[in-house]
Amino acid sequence: MDWLTAENLIAVVTALLGVLVSAGAVWYERRVPHQRRIGYRVQLDTAIGDGAANRAVAGASGAGAAVRRGYFNASPDLADATLVLLRIENDGALALTREHYTDGDDHGLTVEFDGRRVKAVVVTAPEHPRLLSHFPADWQGPAEGSTTILLPKVPLNRGAHYKLLVLLTGGPIGGPVSVDGNIAEGHVHVNHSTTPDDKAPVFSRAARTVTIILTACVVALAAIIVRERTPPPIGCARGTLTVTGSTAFAPAVREAAEKYQRDCEGSTVIVDAHGSTAGIRALAEAGARSPGGGSPAVVALSDGRKPGGYPELRESMVAVSLFTLVLNDGIPVDDLTRDQIRRLYRGEIADWGEIVPGLDRPVLLVSRDAGSGTRQVFQRRVLGRNEPANSSQDCVTRDDPEAKVVRCELDSTEQVLSAVARLPGAIGYVELRASEGRKGLHRVAVDGRRPVVDEIGTSGYPYREIEYAYTWGRPSADSLTTSFLTYLGRGGGQDVVLAHGHLPCATPKGLRICGDG
């Protein structure tokens, strides 16, 4: 019973507790009858000096407040007067009508001031002014000197309230104040508030308790989930794998390798790219040295199919890659025909003035070395032939006086991008995504068509190729080589490949295009 751990037991108990609390809350809501309640609270009880009563009434009622009727007769005998603000509210779950008051025909509630006599009273309902229409037109409050106030049967919706501002004499502040009355299927009770204008809480005490318990359950479960290590992807393998070959595809493979290593403990994937042809050769050498003729932990990625002469190598298609021509920003050209490109690389166009009239700028061809898959794709898909011989070591000075145009060869995509951006009149070719955000150069369309991943196979853009992964023979099914290639082509690495501007062959569209070759 591998699941029987302390963390799992805590998770199960916490989850069950949350379910039981929720079920109890539902049961309570359905089984426990909702009661009608009238709550009351004293919001103000203070002494007032002689002549200050009228000012206190005006301040408590508020400008614009709905003052219905009552009386506040001036009196010279206010030496022991106190002022009480009493709030009457429906704080239950159901509304109250006149029929729910059962104390008699003439009144609904009785307010009693123990030890103090009523001098004057004002009824106010700032938030529910229409409530005051339920006080009879001839209602004038109690007789002066009474210790009680009989309130009419005022209907109250949930949350509705009104207030009594009462001037009292004959007793100290803080004397007992009570409200009594009989409510059908309910009761009258005292509640509390720290400030005069506090509203009834949004959540009841039971609701707050349930919320706190459920929150604690969620926090406990979240803590367990965070602590629990995410299980590795199916098919993870341990060991060390070297991926070599294409520099154009290397950025995507490098990121996929980092993700695979994070997900699969004990795995190391080294990306060491030096060009497609160089990668094929390195794989062949590793296979030849492998003891017993087994498959070494090496994968060679190639822009297009491998050259002939390596019968032991086995291939799998990974993705379709797009490439682009890049041109120095000093040349105002963003579209070239395939014929113009071929003439440029045959040396028939040696100055950009032949394409842009009035521009005097020599053409500089910045190319990749002979082992580059990017170059091989360019020759195969765009030029239809090999590039001319190298004529410059620095991409500026023509070393061969018989060469028609300056042409240099560089070892990597990054070197090509740097040279084209730096040298006026320079043109080169690179993998599509590598050219993004580079200053000093821009992409060039071919025959009006631009490299767009979503348009692969429909736009007719020619500079594209399938990325192949090669192994020495068939690696074992449980090897790191097989696991990583599966991850790259069909697993989580597929999203990385797509994010880098390549179309995975395992997608529905990729299957059709890769199948067509």
Image (cartoon, helix red, strand yellow):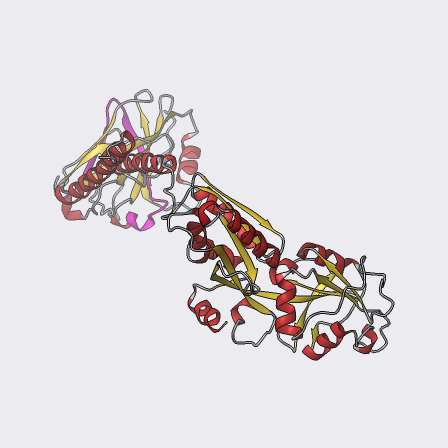
Which residue is at the front of the view, 196 or 221? 221
Which residue is at the front of the view, 183 or 53? 183
Which residue is at the front of the view, 11 or 492? 492
On the image, the x and y values in percent for residue 293 come to 46, 49
Q: Is residue 61 magenta?
A: no
- Residue that sits furthest to the front in the current view: 292
On the image, the x and y values in percent for residue 466 come to 53, 66
- Residue 255 shows up from this direction: no
Q: Which residues are magenta?
A: 105-132
- Residue 330 shows up from this direction: yes
Residue 237 occupies quadrant = top left
On the image, the x and y values in percent for residue 119 come to 31, 30
* Residue in the picture at 35% in, 35% down: 73
Q: Is residue 111 magenta?
A: yes
Q: Quadrant of the N terminus?
A: top left
Where 97 falls versus 174 (above or below)? below
* Residue in the picture at 76% in, 67% down: 389
In the image: residue 5, left or right of residue 260: left
How many numbered marks are there? Answer: 0
Where 184 falls versus 458 (above or below)? above
Where 63 falls versus 13 (above or below)? below
Which residue is at the front of the view, 7 or 407? 407
On the image, the x and y values in percent for residue 437 come to 66, 57
Where 486 falls versus 266 (above or below)? below
* Residue in the picture at 46% in, 67% down: 510
